[in-house]
Amino acid sequence: MTFRATILTLYPDMFPGPLGLSLSGEALTRGLWSLEARNIRDHGLGRHRAVDDTPAGGGPGMVLRCDVLAAALDAAVPAGDERPRFLMSPRGRPLSQALARDLATGDGAVIVCGRFEGVDERVIEGRELQELSIGDYVLSGGEIAAMVLLDACVRLIPGVMGKDESGAEESFENGLLEYPHYTRPREWEGRFIPEALLSGDHARIARWRREQGEAVTRARRPDLLKT
Ligand code: SAH
């Protein structure tokens, strides 16, 4: 079983984009995950392949039609496909490291990228799309949000990162932000690598890192300590 991502978008050419390079790109080449970007417009209506229409009740912008998006979903997701279906949306539940970790050990996801003012509510209900947000700001489309979700998941797919970099100590994995990192040279512009890290004493290093992680979390993200 490999992680399969199916993206529904009006801009399939945006994919794999940055996901085709570096860690996620190498994993794609190695077949540790796969990506299929499908054009919602293939299911558009009429000669102009229309996918959107004016909002019921008036107001600015356009809304992605429920019938068009449902047709695109039904063509992309065969009956019996149990992968979770997401709609990238600022109204969604916030993306978290815990969700990325959960998904990374599953068989993938179907991800709908919105555009315009958003998506007709009825297709969200009718096709049981889980709305997922990457943060409290508004993007012009769901594509970059989908890439953020996939990037967070793919690096956690077993085999993508080496054992040494399993990510177990990273920010959010233990409810804390990560401790600061250092590498050579030992002195740079009058700044030194902290003594503890050069001590060779593993217990002391672990203690220093935990204290630093706690301090940076207390200073920058006290909300994380509450949960
Ligand atoms: N009118 C909407 C915003 C539409 S933005 C509102 O006020 O809620 C257009 C599309 O960009 C959305 O349909 C969604 O797919 C995507 N998008 C925008 N911001 C996002 C975010 N923070 N997280 C995930 N997707 C987002």
Image (tube, grey):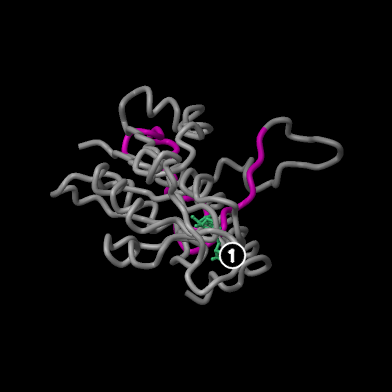
Residue 51, percent across and down? 43, 49
Please name the residue shown 51% across and 52% down the image: 115
Please name the residue shown 56% across and 49% down the image: 205
Please name the residue shown 57% across and 73% down the image: 223
Relative to residue 110, is residue 176 drawn left or right? Answer: right
Q: Nearer the viewer, residue 69 or 52?
A: 52
Q: Nearer the viewer, residue 28 or 155?
A: 28
Relative to residue 152, is residue 117 drawn left or right? Answer: right
The part of the chain drawn in magenta is: 158-183
Residue 147, percent across and down? 48, 43
Secondary structure under badge 1?
A: loop
Residue 3, percent across and down? 29, 39
Relative to residue 143, is residue 162 drawn left or right? Answer: left
Relative to residue 159, is residue 145 drawn left or right? Answer: right
Look at label 1 and name its amino acid. Answer: Asp
Residue 222: quadrant of the picture? bottom right
Residue 198: quadrant of the picture? top right
Magenta segment, principal secondary structure? loop
Residue 21, percent across and down? 51, 27
Residue 22 against residue 72 in the figure, above or below = above
Please name the residue shown 38% across and 29% down the image: 27
Residue 184 against residue 215 in the figure, above or below = above
Q: Nearer the viewer, residue 74 or 103?
A: 74
| Residue on which the image places disc 1 | 136
